[in-house]
Image (spheres, rainbow, N blue to C red):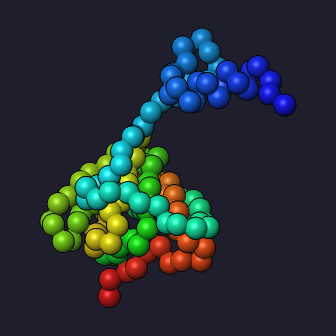
Amino acid sequence: MFKPALVGIAFLFATGAGAAADQPVSVELVLRTSQTIAEQQIELPQGPVEVTGSIFTIQPGASLPVHRHAFARYGYMLAGELTVSNQETGKKQTFHAGDMIVESIGKWHSGSNSGQVPVKLFVLDQAPMGAQTTEVKE
């Protein structure tokens, strides 16, 4: 059964409209894109998928190993400064708290904490049930 308050909230989210400062709910668009940071078209897996959410903590000066992803992966920077280096193109991009990252698919890359405080990165994966989402380069 629909309740008028729920219909109003659904309309707010459907229209993408933000709430005024005196309203208890607001929506801020962080990113709308159809491409990864490597300018690839985003395509979702077909069939049943498993959604996994993780929070990565990367200490200042630390780096992730060179790796690649087989499926769409999204990150939201909660804190810190992360520099992502694409090993294939040499392109580097730096992300800060509040930035959204749509990671490249099938391209070797690495990330490093280029700041002075720990990076906190929320990561969301969508992949076929039980699939390995990350491959580390040997």
Residue located 32% across and 72% down the image: 106
Residue 6 image-quadrant placement: top right
**Quadrant (top left/top right/bottom left/bottom right) for the C terminus:** bottom left
Number of marks in the rendered image: 0
| 28 with respect to 10 (left or right) | left
Return the x and y of residue 38 as percentages of the image width and height. Answer: 25, 59
Rendered position, 106 above or below 7: below
Residue toward you, 86 or 70: 70
Q: Is residue 63 visible?
A: no
Residue at 43% from the left image edge and 68% from the top image edge: 71
Residue 125 showing in the rendered view: yes
Locate the N terminus and report the quarter of the image it occupies.
Answer: top right
Residue visible at 59% across and 77% down in the picture? 130
Looking at the image, which is closer to me, 81 or 107? Answer: 107
Looking at this view, is 33 or 132 the one in front? 33
Q: Would residue 27 appear left or right of 68 to someone viewing this image?
A: right
Image quadrant where residue 22 sits: top right
Q: Which residue sits furthest right?
A: 1
* Residue 83 position in % (x across, y down): 28, 57
User: In this image, 124 relative to 105: left or right?
Assistant: right
The spot of residue 20 in percent (x, y) is: 54, 14
- Looking at this rendering, what residue extends furthest in the front direction? 46
Tell me if residue 6 comes above or below residue 23 in the rendering.
below
Counting from the top left corner in percent of width and height, residue 97 is at 40, 43
